């Protein structure tokens, strides 16, 4: 039976648009493109719909309104999460802030972890619907097990979104590639405006 690694609950990950609260309780739907159908998840940010395509084959495990866990098939000791965090992101990504990310990286890890090498900080690995991002990658040891972690911070102004992944060192590259690929599918979908009614010509 697959189980989420319990100590990984300390990890953070999340989402939102300026000041609005995102409910990560998922609704399953289908996207169609050129006759092909793709399963997707839908969330809501105030009156705006959000769509997201999880990595193919990964299970979706809602934790609470602001936390969504994901589990890849046939893997153990894995924690993948998306979390909405109602605190500012404010990613300036200048030299001082990048140093801050590096200095505070140990705070992202489970208790009793030991960092093996200097964390890798990547500013703006992608723009998520024009929102700035920063990824922190960490190699660490916990109870003799070599592990790797990725946290993508997404600046949504007055709130923040984080995508996090922890796995064994041997599984990390494969899982990180799949999880990272799913980030690009995250979309805020503006509601359609009212359709104008065309009057029949008189006379």
Image (cartoon, rainbow, N blue to C red):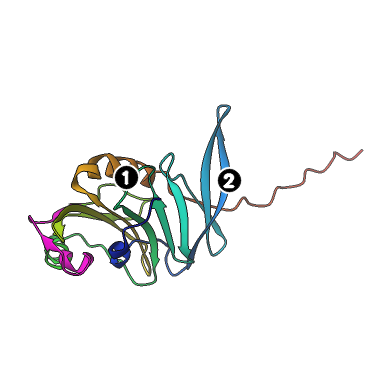
- Position of residue 164 relative to residue 37, above or below, is below
- Quadrant of the image occupied by residue 98: bottom left
| In the foreground, 24 or 63 | 63
Q: Give how far apart the Cα atoms at labels 1 and 2 are.
A: 21 Å
Q: Which mark is residue 29?
A: 2
Q: Secondary structure at mark 1?
A: helix
Taking the image as drawn, is residue 7 in sight? yes
Q: Which region is colored magenta?
A: 105-122
Judge from the rendering whether residue 148 lies leftward or rightward of residue 88; answer left or right. Answer: left
What x and y, as percent, mark residue 105?
Answer: 17, 64
Q: Secondary structure at mark 2?
A: strand
| In the foreground, 47 or 56 | 56
- Position of residue 164 relative to residue 112, above or below, is above
| In the foreground, 13 or 44 | 13
Judge from the rendering whether residue 167 lies leftward or rightward of residue 58; answer left or right. Answer: left
What x and y, as percent, mark residue 19?
Answer: 44, 70
Judge from the rendering whether residue 56 lies leftward or rightward of residue 134; answer left or right. Answer: right
Badge 1: few (under 14), some or many (20 or more) residues near its Cα, within 10 Å? some
- Quadrant of the image occupied by residue 179: top left
Residue ranking furthest to the bottom? 87
Question: Which residue shows up at 44% across the image and 40% down it?
Answer: 57
Badge 2: few (under 14), some or many (20 or more) residues near its Cα, within 10 Å? some
Q: Contact (CB < 8 A) between labels 1 and 2?
A: no
Between discs 1 and 2, the one toward the N terminus: 2
| In the foreground, 170 or 29 | 170
Q: Is 111 a magenta residue? A: yes
**Residue topped by disc 1:** 180
Residue ranking furthest to the left? 117
């Amino acid at each position: 039976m697959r189980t989420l690694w319990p100590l990984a609950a300390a990890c953070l990950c999340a989402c939102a648009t300026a000041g609005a609260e995102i409910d990560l309780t998922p609704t399953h739907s289908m996207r169609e493109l050129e006759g092909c159908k793709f399963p997707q998840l839908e969330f809501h940010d105030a009156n705006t719909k959000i769509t997201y395509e999880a990595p193919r084959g990964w299970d979706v495990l809602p934790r609470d309104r602001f936390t969504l866990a994901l589990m890849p098939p046939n893997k153990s000791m894995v924690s993948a999460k998306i979390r909405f965090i109602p605190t500012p992101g404010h990613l300036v990504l200048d030299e001082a802030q990048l140093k801050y990310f590096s200095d505070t990286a140990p705070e992202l890890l489970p208790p009793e972890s030991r960092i093996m090498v200097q964390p890798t900080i990547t500013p703006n690995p992608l723009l998520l619907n024009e929102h700035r991002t920063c990824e922190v990658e960490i190699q660490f040891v916990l109870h003799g097990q070599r592990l790797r972690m990725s946290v993508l911070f997404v600046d949504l102004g007055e709130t923040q979104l984080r995508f996090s992944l922890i796995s064994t060192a041997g599984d990390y590259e494969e899982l990180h590639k799949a999880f990272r690929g799913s980030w690009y599918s995250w979309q805020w979908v503006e509601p359609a405006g009212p359709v104008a009614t065309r009057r029949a010509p008189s006379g």
